[in-house]
Amino acid sequence: QVQLVESGGGLVQPGGSLRLSCAASGFSLNYYAIGWFRQAPGKEREGVSCISTYGSTTYYADSVKGRFSISRDNSKKTVYLQMNSLKPEDTAVYYCAADRWCRSNWSVEGHYDSWGQGAQVTVSS
């Protein structure tokens, strides 16, 4: 059974940092690119970042470029999203999802087959 589980969310002050983890089970993570998405209240889900199967290629949304960093450890079957300099507008439920590769239009959620349940990130003073 293919499963993705996010963890590491929480409440953080503006300017703070969090690291999200996406743990995979039931399939070989080596064969999949992983995307991170987020959905803020009342807004559509948007792509945040994507990392290729072995991490050689990464993509970021303009809104997080320079502040967020995606990485992966295939031996641990885990993908990470390091989030620095967090802003209140980063508040959202964050999801990870699997695709066979990071496409040129990687932020289109319809490309992704399997999704985690989401992790809440709240940035507030």
Image (cartoon, grey):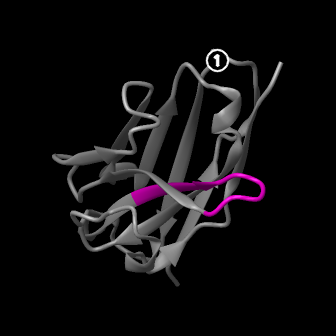
Q: Residue furthest top?
A: 15
Q: Residue furthest bottom?
A: 1
In which quarter of the view is residue 52 placed? bottom left
Q: Position of residue 74 (x, y in %)?
A: 31, 53
Residue 39: say if magenta. yes
Q: What type is the residue that disc 1 sits on? A: Gly
Q: Which residues are magenta?
A: 35-44
Q: Which residue is mark 1?
A: 16
In which quarter of the view is residue 121 placed? top right
Residue nearest the observer in this picture, 107 or 53 = 107
Q: Residue at x 54, y 73 (%)?
A: 3
Count neighbours of disc 1 (C-alpha within 10 A) and say few if under 14, some if 14 to 19, many if 20 or more.
Answer: some
Vertical position of residue 14 compared to residue 101: above or below? above
Q: Position of residue 85 (x, y in %)?
A: 55, 19
Vertical position of residue 97 compared to residue 47: above or below? below
Quadrant assignment for the C terminus: top right
Q: Is residue 53 left or right of residue 70?
A: left
Q: How many labels sit on residues? A: 1
Which structural element holds mark 1?
Answer: loop
Residue 73: say if magenta. no
Residue nearest the observer in this picture, 1 or 57 = 57
